[in-house]
Image (cartoon, helix red, strand yellow):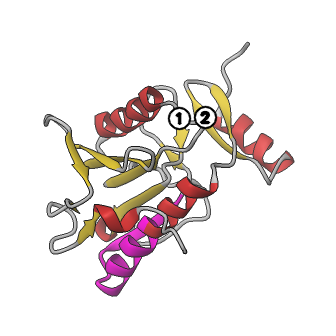
């Protein structure tokens, strides 16, 4: 199969606007809908992050439909479940793919996701300049925090996620992220 390009991806998305797609090493990957739990967790993270960032004019927060055109040899277009970009790096928004890597990304494991693939996706972003990547796993109620040239940190209920190098003062209690149970 020939290697696909950004133009091929854009044509496929124009023909199938309801599909979420990524371009990885010349191959288009159609993203299936996640389960309710993982999307609820991602929505909570995005809300908490966005409320902090917007009220302080620190930058942009995006959800899983925002594509990033990565500065790698294959011109990948990837979409983390949640992302933050410092204001100075993207002072104006664009209707196109952002041609940069976010400063902070979150990947929330859904039922159909593979942990090794999610870890590799985070590592790919870190290799290209993302400062912090967080893998959130609702099943184990853990967050794996990755930074370049550092060992991963595993957070669980009782811990707080902080990203002081990007968001001084912001913290997210791990236990608050999980989908609530109603009686």
- In the picture shown, does residue 11 fall above or below 116? below
Residue at the outermost front position? 183
The quadrant holding residue 52 is bottom left
Specify whether 181 is left or right of 132. right
Specify whether 27 is left or right of 135. right
Q: Is residue 66 visible?
A: no
- Image x and y of residue 167, in percent: 21, 68
- In the picture shown, does residue 67 fall above or below 125? below
- In the picture shown, does residue 9 fall above or below 25? below
Q: Circle 1: is it few (<14), some (14-19), or many (20+) Cα within 10 Å? A: many
Please, what secondary structure does the residue beneath circle 2 have?
A: strand
- In the picture shown, does residue 9 fall above or below 158? above
Of the numbered discs 2 and 1, the one sitting upstream in the chain is: 2
Q: Residue at x 55, y 24 (%)?
A: 25
Q: Nearer the viewer, residue 20 or 26?
A: 20
Cα gap from disc 2 to disc 1, whole angstroms: 5 Å
For the magenta stretch, what is the residue range? 45-63
Q: Residue at x 86, y 46 (%)?
A: 15
Residue at the outermost bottom position? 55
Q: Circle 2: is it few (<14), some (14-19), or many (20+) Cα within 10 Å? A: many
* Residue marked by disc 1: 76
- Image x and y of residue 37, in percent: 56, 56
Please, what secondary structure does the residue beneath circle 1 have?
A: loop
The circle drawn on residue 169 is none
The circle drawn on residue 23 is 2
Q: Quadrant of the N terminus?
A: top right
Residues tagged 2 and 1 counted as in contact (Cβ below 8 A): yes
Q: Nearer the viewer, residue 47 or 136?
A: 136
């Amino acid at each position: 199969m020939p290697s696909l390009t950004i133009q091929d991806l854009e044509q496929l998305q124009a023909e199938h606007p309801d599909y979420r797609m990524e371009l990885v090493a010349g191959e288009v990957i159609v993203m299936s809908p996640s389960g309710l739990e993982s999307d609820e967790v991602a929505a909570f993270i995005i809300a908490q992050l966005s409320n902090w960032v917007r009220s302080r004019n620190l930058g942009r927060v995006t959800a899983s439909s925002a594509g990033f055109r990565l500065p790698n040899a294959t011109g990948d277009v990837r979409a983390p479940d949640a992302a933050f970009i410092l204001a100075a790096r993207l002072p104006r928004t664009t209707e196109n793919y952002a041609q940069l890597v976010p400063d902070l990304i979150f990947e929330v494991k859904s039922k159909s996701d593979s942990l090794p693939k999610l870890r590799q996706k985070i590592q790919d972003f870190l290799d290209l300049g993302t400062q912090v990547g967080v893998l959130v796993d609702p099943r184990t109620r853990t967050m794996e925090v990755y930074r370049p040239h550092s060992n991963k940190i595993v957070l669980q209920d009782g811990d707080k996620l902080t990203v002081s190098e990007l968001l001084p003062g912001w913290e997210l209690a791990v236990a608050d992220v999980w989908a609530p149970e109603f009686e």
